[in-house]
Image (cartoon, grey):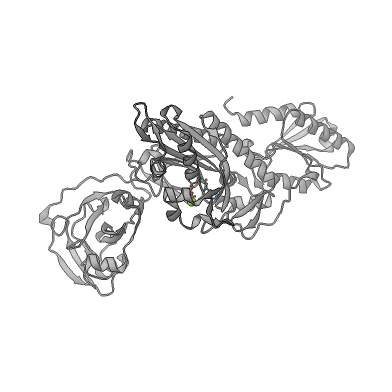
Amino acid sequence: MRYSEMHLPTAREIPSDAEVTSHQLMIRAGMIRKLTSGIYSYLPLGYRVIRKVEQIVREEMNRAGAQEVHLPMVQPVELWQESGRWIHYGKELLRFRDRHEREYCLGPTHEEVITDLIRNDIKTYRQLPRNLYQIQTKFRDEVRPRFGVMRCREFGMKDAYSYDADEAGAEKSYEKMFVAYNNIFNRCGLKFRPVEADSGSIGGKYSHEFMVMADSGEDAIVFCEKCAYAANLEKAEIGEPEKKNIAEKDWLSLESVHTPDACTIEEVSAFLKVKPQDIVKTLIYNADGKSCAVLIRGDQDVNEIKVKNYLGTAELELADEGMILKVTDAPRGFAGAVKINTRVIADYSVMNMINFVTGANKQDYHFKNVNIGRDFNVEAFIDLRVAQENDSCPRCGGKIKFARGIEVGHVFKLGTKYSKAMKAAFLDKDGQEKIMIMGCYGIGIGRTVAACIEQNFDENGIIWPMPLAPYQVIITPVNINEEEVMKASESIYASMLACGIEVILDDRDERAGVKFKDADLIGIPIRITVGQKNLAQGNIELKIRKTAENRLYPLQKIVEEVKALIDQELNPAA
Ligand code: ATP
Ligand code: MG
C-alpha cells in the first residue's frame, strides 16, 4: 500500500484519557478510535492486526477439529429464562424490546444459543463429540470499561463450545483446546502462562486462564519459583500445614476482657497489645440464606471463592446486622466461636493456634486465652485464605511468587450446567437418554492485540512481532523528489508485492525524520531505507525495528533477504 493513500492518522501527543501504554499507542498509531464509552472503531491498520489474530485462531481451532459457525448476536429472552441467566446474569446483559414488546439481549456469550442449536440437531451418541466455534462480536455492559479495547463493552471474541457423551470425552475435548490455545498464543509471539482458575464445583484441572505476563495486567497470578504450578490468585491453593501437638497443660484459662469500641483487628490488637497473629477473626457469612462462621488468623484474608466452593452455595455474602445479632447475640465487631449459634469452619492458619483472642459475642468484650477443643470445636480446618507471596507451593513446597497478567483466553469445563437446564440430551449406545457434557473456550481478539502491545513497545512506539504485524515491511525513500531513489523504491516495492510481502511504500513528501518516526510508532518490523548516498554504491539499508540493528544489502539482493527474514520470523522452528 502507498502511504499517501492510506487512512493512517498517527499522532504524537499522548491521549489524555488513555491510562495504559497499549491504549495510548493504539490511538497514536491510528489503529482505533473511540465512538463512545467502551465502544471502539478499528481503523485499517488496527483491523489488519485483528484479522491476523483471527486467522491464527481459525487455523488452530480448525486443526483441533473444531468447526466454524456464526451465531446471531441478538438473542431471545426465552433461552435465557431456560438457563436461568435472565435473572442471574445481572447488569452486564444489555436487554431491549422489539416493536412487539418481545424481549431480547445482546449476546455477551453464547451458551444458550448454541445449546439450543445442538439439542435440536443432535439425537444420538453417534453425532458426538462436537466442537463448534465462532469469531464474533460480544456485548457486555461492563461497569467500568477501561484501557481501550482491553476491557470494553463491544468486542470480538472467539468462543467455542464442546459437547461430549461422557466425562472421558469431555476431558479429551478440554485437552485439545488447551493444546490449541498454547499453539495460538505461541504463534502470536506472546509470553504467556496458562494458570489454574476457579472452576466452581468441577474441580482444579478444568479451568485455565491464559495470561499474558504484563505489569499493567488487571489479574494477580501466583506461580511457584521451582515447579510449573501457576494459578489465578483467586484459585491459588495453600497446602495443609503440619498439625502440631498441642499440650493441654499449655492452655491458659479463658478470660473475658472489656474492650470498649475495639472492633477491628487493628483496634483490638492495639488495645490488648497483642499481635494480629494472635487474634482469630470471626466472619459471619450469609450462604444462600443460612449463616456460617469462618475463622481465620488476624493477619490473613478470607478468599470467599474458597468458602463458597466448600459450602457449595450459589450466593455468599457477609451477613447483615440482623443475621449477626441472631448468631452472636451481639452487634458487629464482637463475634467469636465460643458459644456461637451457627456452623463454624476454620482456615488452616487457625489450626495450630493456642491461647488466642476472639470476640466474646457480647458488645465491647473479647476473650483472651481461647483454645479449640476446650472452648469450642470446628467442623473442619480447610484452605480458606488468600495466598501471600512466599507461601509454600501446594505442589512442591517451593516458594510462591506474585506476578501480574492479562487474561486473553479461558478454557472451562462446564459439565452439565447448561445442557441439563436446557435439556440437551442424546440416546446412548444402550438406548438410554443422557445429558451432554459441555466445555466452553473463549479468546478475546482485541484484548490479545492490546496485550501484545503491552509486551512489545519502546519509547518510540509499537514493536510488532512478525506474525501480528499489520505490514511486514515499510519502504522509506529518503527524498521522493530524487528520481533514482524513487525508481529503486518503486522497483523494490513491486518485487515485494509480487512475492507476497505485506509492504507499505512511504511515498509522502515529508522529511525523512517524520517518516522514520511514523514507521517506528506503527511498529513495522522491517524498514527499508532508500537514500541517495547508499544507492550510489548500489546499496539499500535494512533496519530491524526490534533491535535497531542496521544492515546494508545490494539492491539486487534486498527482496530475497527480506523474504528470508520474514519466513524465519514466522516459522522459527523451521
Ligand atoms: P474478565 O475476568 O477479564 O472480565 P471474563 O472471565 O469475563 O474476563 P470470559 O467470559 O472468560 O471473560 O471471556 C473470554 C475472553 O473474552 C476473556 O479471556 C477475554 O480475553 C475476553 N474478554 C472478556 N471480557 C472482555 C472485555 N470487556 N473486553 C475485551 N475482552 C474481553
Ligand atoms: Mg468479565
Q: Nearer the viewer, residue 397 or 465?
A: 465
x then y, percent, for residue 465:
62, 38
Residue 166 located left or right of residue 94? left
Residue 388 located left or right of residue 556? left
Residue farthest front in this picture: 100
Residue farthest bottom in this picture: 260
Q: Residue at x 83, y 37 (%)?
A: 533
x then y, percent, for residue 447:
56, 46
Residue 373 located left or right of residue 422? left
Q: Which residue is drawn at 72% across and 30% down?
A: 500
Where the C terminus falls, by quadrant? top right
Q: Tell me if I can see residue 140 in this picture.
A: no
Q: Residue at x 43, y 47 (%)?
A: 221
Q: Which of 419 and 12 is in front in this view?
A: 419
Q: Tell me if I can see residue 374 in this picture.
A: yes
x then y, percent, for residue 448:
56, 43
Q: In this view, does 59 lie above or below 30?
A: above
Q: Nearer the viewer, residue 30 or 490?
A: 30
Where the N terminus falls, by quadrant? top right
Q: In this view, does 568 lie above or below 385?
A: above
Residue farthest left in this picture: 249
Q: Which residue is drawn at 53% across and 52% down?
A: 105
Residue farthest top in this picture: 574
Q: Is residue 391 above or below residue 186?
A: below
Q: Total number of numbered labels?
A: 0
